[in-house]
Image (cartoon, rainbow, N blue to C red):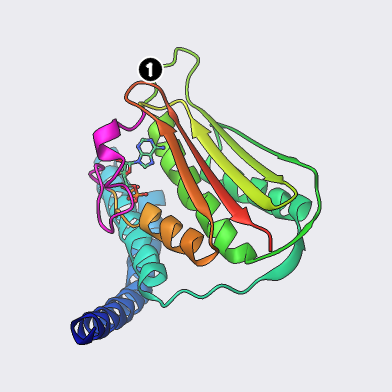
């Protein structure tokens, strides 16, 4: 037990350090990105434009990492509030459109009703799953092109979130590792997206189901109990 406590303290200290670092990196990073964007737009040659776009892309990647680190290292707590599922879905639609100007993202919901859950946590869960689905759908072999579906439905005892894509799928032997922090197969991944999803879902006593296999696309279902 003492060992466990010491381990917990160590993790808390590490988490705090990660949070401070991530926070300190954010402001200078946004200046770097902002100026690079300006220079990218006013570049005089194609070569110059490309150089600046590399800076912008890499800064965006760091931005994602620091945001995820901040979220992951904070002691997450859940604050339920009553909200309407219909409103939640329409807010998600707007955010999804920003992420996917040209992709086929369908967001549907059933049985609109009020629920009493942590809306911000749910939003974070859906957006992380959506980001992965979009990354995966980009590598689809479906001749019809990338497809992603997000479904939010309020049932009697649970809110169900489903994010499905027609990407390359996840081999069964990888599925156990998905939620381990920093596990990623992407060159530009942070490996924190699903770790955050898992933590938030656990905090709300929810369940995660992965339905996927190599070559078959991926469907992730999350069920959050309503009481
Ligand atoms: P990241 O997206 O930064 O890699 P995540 O924790 O969100 O971190 O995901 C971990 C890994 O899980 C990804 O690198 C990828 O290999 C796999 N993965 C997650 N979602 C999907 C998906 N929809 N389709 C295929 N692979 C996925």
Q: x, y (%) of residue 110? A: 76, 40
- For residue 179: magenta? yes
Q: Nearer the viewer, residue 121 or 63?
A: 121
* Residue at 42 percent of width and 26 percent of height: 217
Q: Which residue is mark 1?
A: 141
* Residue at 58 percent of width and 57 percent of height: 123
Q: Nearer the viewer, residue 94 or 33?
A: 94
Task: Classify the position of the C terminus by image quarter.
Answer: bottom right
* Residue at 48 percent of width and 48 percent of height: 208
Task: Classify the position of the N terminus by image quarter.
Answer: bottom left
- For residue 33: magenta? no
Q: Residue furthest top?
A: 143
Q: Which residues are magenta?
A: 169-188
Q: Nearer the viewer, residue 106 or 172?
A: 172
* Residue at 36 percent of width and 72 percent of height: 26
Residue 184 placement, left or right of 112:
left
Instruction: Classify the position of ligand 1 by quadrant: top left, top right, bottom left or bottom right.
Output: top left
Label 1 SS: loop
Q: Quadrant of residue 49?
A: top left
């Amino acid at each position: 037990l003492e060992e466990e406590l010491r381990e917990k303290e160590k993790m808390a200290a590490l988490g705090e350090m990660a949070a401070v670092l991530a926070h300190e990196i954010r402001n200078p990073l946004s200046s770097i990105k902002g100026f690079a964007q300006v220079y990218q737009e006013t570049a005089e040659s194609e070569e110059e434009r490309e150089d600046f776009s590399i800076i912008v892309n890499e800064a965006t990647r760091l931005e994602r990492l620091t945001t995820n680190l901040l979220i992951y290292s904070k002691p997450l707590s859940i604050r339920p509030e009553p909200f309407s599922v219909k409103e939640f879905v329409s807010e998600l639609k707007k955010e999804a459109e920003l992420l996917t100007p040209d992709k086929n993202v369908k967001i549907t919901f059933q049985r609109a009703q009020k629920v009493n859950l942590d809306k911000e946590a749910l939003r974070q869960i859906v957006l992380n799953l959506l980001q992965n689905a979009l990354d995966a759908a980009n590598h689809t072999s479906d001749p019809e092109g990338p497809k992603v579906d997000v479904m939010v439905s309020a049932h009697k005892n649970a809110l169900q979130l489903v994010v499905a894509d027609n990407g390359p799928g996840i081999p069964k032997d990888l599925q156990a590792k998905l939620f381990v922090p920093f596990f990623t197969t992407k060159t530009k991944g942070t490996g924190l997206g699903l770790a955050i999803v898992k933590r938030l879902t656990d905090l709300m006593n929810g369940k995660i189901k992965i339905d996927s296999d190599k070559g078959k696309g991926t469907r992730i279902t999350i069920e959050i109990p309503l009481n």
